[in-house]
Amino acid sequence: MSKPLNLIHRKADTWMRQGISPRRLALTLALGFAIGCVPVVGIPTVICAALALAFRLNLPAIQAANYAAMPLQLLLIVPFVRLGGRLHDFGPRQAFNLWTLLHSSPMAAISLLGGLAGQALLAWLLIAIPAVALMTAALTVLLRHIPEVAAAESGD
């Protein structure tokens, strides 16, 4: 095994032996993945760290799931904006035009981008809640088959 892969394997083994139950580790991974898809670039890492510290979740695990989801974050921004626009009308609909945005006043641009971010966050929130529940259930079942994690079952 190469040095980087060996290092990753040792670190993952250490995380698994920290006494976290399969259900709690599954929740941590599901939250990290869902938050990693937040349609506002730049904030998922901070949110994941704050949640991990506030709820005593496994910080390396939540950040690893967050980073794994980052490519999806960029792919899902436009679908989230569109879905959010259909769910809630934030005033008169105007077609998004980059040229108009670049040539408008800074306050108009901030207002437009803020409305789009609000629409995307609304759609993300409606999808993320059931997605976390489903991912947690599926990952719990999978993690119970890993002996090191299953040994910590009584930790909850």
Image (cartoon, rainbow, N blue to C red):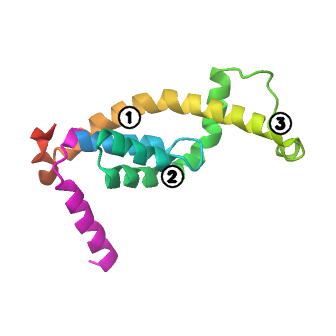
* Rendered image quadrant of residue 139: top left
Image mark for residue 51? none
Q: Is residue 129 left or right of residue 138?
A: right
**Is residue 9 shown in magenta?**
yes
In terms of sequence position, does the residue under pointer 3 or pointer 1 come before the other?
3
Q: Is residue 154 left or right of residue 13?
A: left
Image mark for residue 108? 3
Which residue is nearer to you in this view: 138 or 133? 133
Residue beneath the point at 26% across and 73% down: 6
Question: At numbered mark 2, what does the secondary structure look like: helix, strand or loop?
Answer: helix
The percent coordinates of residue 83 (x first, y second) are: 62, 29
- Magenta stretch bounds: 1-23
Residue beneath the point at 13% across and 41% down: 155
138 lies above or below 49: above
Q: Badge 1 is on which residue?
A: 132
Q: Badge 2 is on which residue?
A: 70
Is disc 2 surrounded by few (<14), some (14 to 19) or many (20+) residues within 10 Å?
many
Q: Are marks 2 and 1 in contact (CB under 8 Å)?
A: no
In terms of sequence position, does the residue under pointer 2 or pointer 1 come before the other?
2
* Rendered image quadrant of residue 2: bottom left
Q: Are marks 2 and 3 in contact (CB under 8 Å)?
A: no
Q: Tell me the amino acid under the disc marked 3.
A: Ala
| Quarter of the figure with the N terminus | bottom left
Q: Is residue 38 left or right of residue 61?
A: right
C-alpha gap between disc 3 and disc 1: 35 Å
C-alpha gap between disc 2 and disc 3: 29 Å
Question: At numbered mark 3, what does the secondary structure look like: helix, strand or loop?
Answer: helix
